[in-house]
Image (spheres, rainbow, N blue to C red):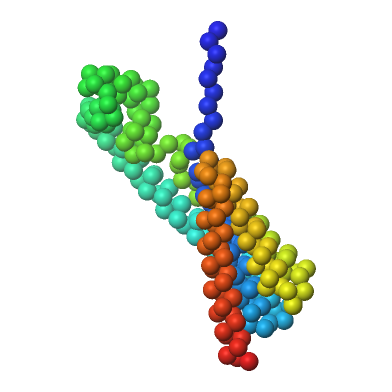
């Protein structure tokens, strides 16, 4: 009996991985930046925490809504394209067969073989063949708005909770250093984890996320310090 060759690919992770990494990264960066900015403006410890919690709630809802609207728009476009393809298959199946065969010719098949492949695939699942090979829509890469929204909100909340926990336990005198340093560690870990899950270089992924997070926190801290000095 021939041995079955099994392969594991990462493309099925694209949808949820993108939403989860974006949410967690935004949660850490935006909440840590907010905490640092408010702390630099000479706010009280309780004031810093209130601002951080408010930022967590607002950010999670914003991420969920934004991700849902974005992916829902993609899903609507895919649905419209599939409906048009379904109509074309119902009205002129011969033209659709030629169109599919021409796609396979461009990919390297001989015209006769491309025609045969198109006929067989359309005989099995005409709409599925055109969705996959003409429109680029597949089950793995199909838009899932609710999944993306929930993943973004949950990951944002998880990410935002990390600098908030540090801010809650750190004394006000060292809060900025503690939150900033811990958040950089969190971001490096997130970048490395995302890179590993996606099959990318771990060090590059960690550095990329950490650099932009550090820049955002530094700028926000500077604004808070300038504002606090001006008010004072």
Which residue corresponds to the image point at 37% horizontal and 34% vertical from the top-left?
132
Q: Is residue 37 left or right of residue 121?
A: right
In percent of the image, x 53 and y 44: which residue is there? Answer: 201
Farthest-out residue, bottom:
232
**Which x, y percent locates residue 199?**
53, 40
Q: Position of residue 35 (x, y in %)?
A: 65, 72
Relative vertical location of residue 199 with respect to residue 59 in this rendering, above or below? above
Q: Is residue 202 left or right of residue 135?
A: right
Q: Is residue 58 visible?
A: no
Image quarter in which the C terminus is found: bottom right
Residue 95: quarter of image: top left
Vertical relation: 65 (above or below) 15: below
Classify residue 19 as left or right of residue 170.
Answer: left
Q: Quadrant of residue 142?
A: top left
Residue 43 visible to an observer of this rendering = yes
Say how many tags the image has.
Answer: 0
Q: Residue at x 64, y 79 (%)?
A: 40
Q: Residue furthest top?
A: 1
Quarter holding the N terminus? top right
Q: Position of residue 5 (x, y in %)?
A: 53, 20
> Residue 60: percent from the left, percent from the top?
59, 62
Residue 73 falls left or right of residue 206: left
Relative to the observer, which residue lies in front, 86 or 178? 178
Residue at (55%, 55%) from the top-left corner? 207
């Amino acid at each position: 009996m021939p041995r079955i060759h099994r392969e594991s690919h990462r493309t099925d992770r694209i949808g949820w991985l993108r939403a989860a990494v974006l949410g967690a990264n935004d949660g850490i960066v935006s909440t840590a930046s907010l905490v640092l900015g408010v702390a630099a403006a000479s706010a009280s410890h309780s004031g810093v925490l209130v601002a951080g919690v408010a930022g967590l709630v607002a950010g999670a809802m914003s991420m969920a809504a934004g991700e849902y609207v974005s992916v829902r728009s993609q899903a609507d476009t895919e649905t419209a394209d599939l409906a048009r393809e379904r109509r074309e298959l119902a009205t002129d199946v011969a033209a659709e067969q030629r169109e599919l065969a021409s796609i396979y010719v461009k990919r390297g098949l001989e015209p006769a073989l491309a025609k045969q492949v198109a006929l067989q695939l359309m005989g099995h699942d005409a709409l599925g063949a055109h969705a996959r090979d003409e429109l680029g829509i597949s089950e793995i890469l199909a838009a899932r708005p609710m999944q993306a929204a929930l993943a973004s909100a949950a990951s944002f909340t998880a990410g935002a909770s990390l600098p908030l926990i540090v801010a809650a336990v750190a004394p006000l005198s060292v809060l900025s250093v503690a939150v900033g340093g811990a958040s950089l560690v969190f971001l490096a870990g997130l970048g490395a984890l995302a890179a590993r899950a996606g099959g990318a270089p771990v060090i590059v992924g960690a550095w990329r996320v950490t650099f932009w997070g550090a820049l955002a926190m530094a700028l926000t801290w500077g604004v808070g310090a300038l504002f606090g000095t001006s008010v004072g």
